[in-house]
Amino acid sequence: MTHRRIILAALLAIGCADSAGGGSAGAPAARAGGGAGQAGAAGGRASEAGSAGHAVSGSGGAPDAGEPTGGARPPAAGADAGSAGSAGARADSGAGGSSAMDAGSAAELPAELLDLEPWKLTLPTGDEGDPTEILQPELSTFALEPYFHVNAAGDGVVFRAHAGGVTTGNSSYPRSELREMAGDGSEMAAWSTSEGTHTLTLVQTITHLPEAKPHVVAGQVHDADDDVLMIRLEDTNLFVEGGGEDLGTLEPSYVLRTRFTVKIEASGGRIRVFYEDMATPRVDIERDLEGCYFKAGAYTQSNPERGDAPDAYGEVVIHELSLTHEP
């Protein structure tokens, strides 16, 4: 019996030792797994930091330098942070994508900024008395620096006419100017001030004037025979001219590169001009006319005979151009 107890005690001792050894072996494995989990968590945070940095840099900031890159996180917190990091990356991708798309789709052609379908363009180039004209559909893909192109800011179309430029047969002054057309752009527009309502709205900036005679026309109404009304800048005086007369002041102390909005409206045998305030006209005149059309751009009112160098120029930027005709 005593001998049997000794053998049983020995067997129990051996079993306990084996159990303890197995447990010890299991612990390192668990610790190794924990180490791998920590490495995974650290990698996840590195990825999140990259996403966060991308999101912040996209908004002009910098990643948080104090963000830890090691140490274990509870799985739920890691998952939430990972989700937040992914959401941040998606948000940045959306905002950055929009900005990138905007930048990538920035207008390269004037027709991408302004609706030029119902217009033709006259340039201060070509043969004397026969300046270059660009009609649709060519105008929809046309640009020519420095006379007609998108400005550096990408928010307007530059119209420039130099004093020594080619002129039309009935004028001694050069122009880079749009002339209203009808239909698909191949027919001359011709409407009556007594029938329907005809409106041209322009958001413009006059950016440059010739030196000797600092005059430029930025918008017009013509009839079948001659100009009826002009938006004209002479030095600092921005006003409405018609038939050689001053019809009303818009801005007596205009500063170059100041953006403004002007609306010309013809209806009921009258023509009204609005400046900045689109509810109250600055000019309201009676004109019962046929064969009318609008013009807009830079019609430089100088030439070398007026004392300006051939390369002196007038320049107008059109940011918005709206043309409507209602019955």
Image (spheres, rainbow, N blue to C red):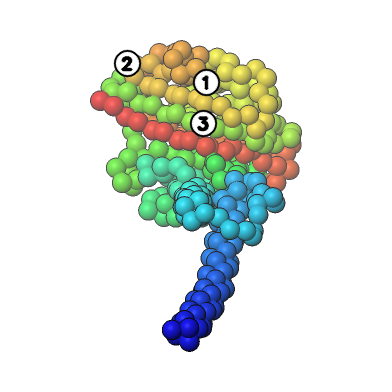
Q: Secondary structure at mark 1?
A: loop
Badge 3: residue crowd in 10 Å (few <14, some 14–19, many ≥20): some
Task: Judge whether 265 appears above or below 298 on screen.
Answer: above
**Amino acid type of the residue tagged 3 in the rendering:** Val
**Amino acid type of the residue tagged 1 in the rendering:** Glu
Q: Secondary structure at mark 2?
A: loop
- Going from N to C along the chain, the mark reached first, 1 or 2, is 2
Give the residue at mark 2: 268
Name the residue nearer the viewer: 214 or 45: 45
Give the residue at mark 3: 203
Point 55% across, 41% down: residue: 155
Residues tagged 1 and 2 counted as in contact (Cβ below 8 A): no
Q: Secondary structure at mark 3?
A: strand
Point 44% across, 15% down: residue: 279
* Position of the C terminus by quadrant: top left
- Going from N to C along the chain, the mark reached first, 2 or 3, is 3
